[in-house]
Image (cartoon, rainbow, N blue to C red):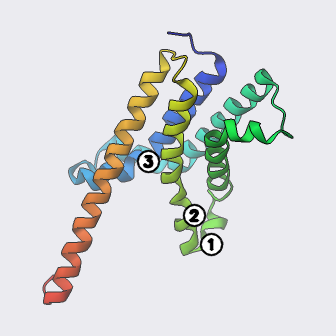
Amino acid sequence: MDTAPLANFLGFLALSSYIATLLPSMLRIVFPQIKRSDVVKLLLKYRRQIGLLAFALAFFHGYLLVLKRNFDFFDLQTYWIYIQGVATFIVFTLLAITSNNWSIKKLKRNWKKLHSLTYLAMFLLTWHVWDKMSSHWSFLTPIGLLQLIIIIALFLQRKRVEQKLMLHTHQSVKTGKR
C-alpha cells in the first residue's frame, strides 16, 4: 500500500467534506427518527460552508496534481484520461458558484434542479476514485471507497423511500384518503 501524497490527502478530505453535505438529507429520509440528532442539525446548519470547503479542497487537489504531472491542456487525451475528475470539478464549480442566497433567489426552482447535480457528482467521484486509485492504493483509498459505498447505499434507499411515499400519496389522492 502506498503512502498518500498531499494531493491525494486533499482529495480524500474533499470527498469526506462532500459526503458530509449529503448525509443530513439522506439520513433524515432513510432514518426519520434521526431528524433531531445534534450531528444532523449541525451538518444542516453548516452544509453550505462544508460544501465550499469541499470545493476548495478539490480545487487544491486538482491544482497539485496538475503541477505534479505537468498536464498538457492542449492535448485532448489529457481530458479523456481525467474525464471523471474534470466532470466532477465542473459540477462542484457550478454548485460552489451558486451556493449563495442571491443565486437561490434568482434561480428559484432551477436552483434545486441545478443542485441535484450533486448526485451525479457522487457517481462520478466513485468512478474517479476507483479508476485513479485502483493501481496504487494508499491507506485512504479503502476509507474513501467505503464512504462512497455507504453514501450511494443511503442514496438508493432514500430513492426507494421517496418512491414509496409518492406512491402512497398518489393512492391516497386517488381514493380520497389522506
Against 31, residue 108 (above or below) is below
Against 122, residue 7 (above or below) is above
Query: Residue sitting at 68 percent across and 35 percent down?
Result: 81
Viewer-nearest residue: 146 or 54: 146
Query: Residue sitting at 22 percent across and 77 percent down?
Result: 169
Q: Quarter-wise, where is residue 175 in the image?
A: bottom left
Alpha carbons under labels 1 and 2: distance apart: 9 Å
The location of residue 39, given as percent across then percent down, is 36, 40
Left or right: 168 in relation to 162:
left
Q: Please report contact status of discs 1 and 2: CB closer than 8 Å, yes or no.
A: yes
Could you tell me the amino acid type at mark 3?
Leu
Could you tell me the amino acid type at mark 1?
Leu
Q: Can you identify the residue that label 2 sits on?
A: 114
Could you tell me the amino acid type at mark 2?
Leu
Disc 3 crowd rating (10 Å Cα; few below 14, some 14-19, many 20+) is: many
Q: Quarter-wise, where is residue 145 in the image?
A: top left
